[in-house]
Image: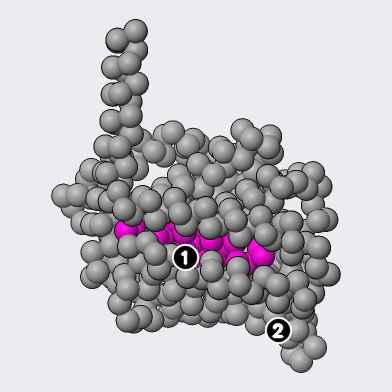
Amino acid sequence: MEEEAKNFFKAWLVVFASLSYSYFIASKIPKGILRFISLLPIFYLFFLLPLSIYRPIPNIILSGFITWIANSRLLLYSFNLGPLSSNQSHSSFLRFIFFGAFPIKVKENTSNDQKDGLVNSYNKVLPLNFWSKIIIFVILEAIYKYNKSMIILCCLMYLFIDIVFGVCDLIVESTLGLELESPSDEPYLSTSLQNFWGRRWNRIISDTLRHTVYLPVKSTAVKFVGRRWASLSGVMASFVVSGLMHELIYYNVTRVTPTWEVTWFFVLHGVCVVLEMVVKRSLGQKWRLHWAISGPLTVGLVMGTGFWLFFPQLMRNHVDVKATEDIMCLGNYFKEIIMKIKNEFVIY
């Protein structure tokens, strides 16, 4: 475990050095294909970094943060777009490092009114803060150790993402004083698949896919299929790319031959979202299920297909058990630190 911690620390040193190169050197190269070529070694490095880690938790963090989000933002940066571009206000080296390495997004000033019959996103039904999520996560982890329920695993994944992203938010907010978007918005209240994937679940990844896949595909497809169908092409392409990226993360964590289950999970949901959009456009406001019906149907569909295609590969390769071991080791590490600090206070 100590060797893994060293490798994880070394990986982040590589990330820091790579982003420093991107800020100080690649930024001097004209935007476009030339800057993209100058960043190709960084793309390759970020793609390989998770292969130096074998434990699931640090590997998932590196794969998600660096291989996916950081590479996506550097791709946009090649054309002076996205959160790393020089167009951003208060651009600085520290800001560049944070937005390159962390899954964060500056909160927009415009209100995000939820559609589909729900209240505004600021009116939380279960107003869980960062610390309450940690407490619930610890309790569920203890239960999962004795009861390997997929429902508990689903809740743990939601809380894990919110907690890890929340740690990044705390660091950046306290350092740069920025107000950041929350990583999710009560996904259990989703009233449609479009609402779930687009506005409530893992909003940072949704934003990343929107700018790197959806908008480019849509702008290209509109020339061939027209504006009406171009957006559907962008949505489907986003789900396919998301599936492939999740498949890559699964491979990094398990190191076994891909089964493509998780890819099919996202392809299936892409098809369902496209069908949902077509139905909504056809029927408009004339026919719409009440949120009390559409909500459970949406969450039930996500969890049911997740139990079928998303989680089995993780459980077959005991990633859930190894992740629990990682969290327990981390907990013991912090416990030792607290005890040392406590003993020092007693001595003095």
Q: Amino acid at mark 2?
A: Trp
Q: Nearer the viewer, residue 43 or 261?
A: 43
**What numbered label is drawn on residue 348?**
none
Q: Secondary structure at mark 1?
A: helix
Instruction: Name the residue rendered at 74%, 64% in the picture.
Output: 26
Q: Amino acid at mark 1?
A: Leu
In the drawing, does residue 74 fall left or right of residue 329? Answer: right
Residue 72, magenta (yes or no): yes
Which residue of the protein is positioned furthest toward the bottom in this rendering?
Answer: 224
Q: What residue is pinned by disc 1? A: 49
Instruction: Name the residue rendered at 55%, 76% in the picture.
Output: 241
Q: Position of residue 290 (x, y in %)?
A: 53, 58
The secondary structure making up most of the magenta span is helix
Neighbourhood count class around disc 1 (C-alpha, 10 Å): few under 14, some 14–19, many 20 upward: many
Indicate the quadrant where residue 44 lies.
Answer: bottom right
Instruction: Name the residue rendered at 32%, 42% in the picture.
Output: 330
Residue 27 seen in the current view: yes
Q: Position of residue 303 (x, y in %)?
A: 37, 64
3D distance between C-alphas at marks 2 and 1: 38 Å
Q: Secondary structure at mark 2?
A: helix
Q: What residue is pinned by disc 2? A: 229
In the drawing, does residue 331 fall left or right of residue 27? Answer: left
Which residue of the protein is positioned furthest toward the left in this rendering?
Answer: 146
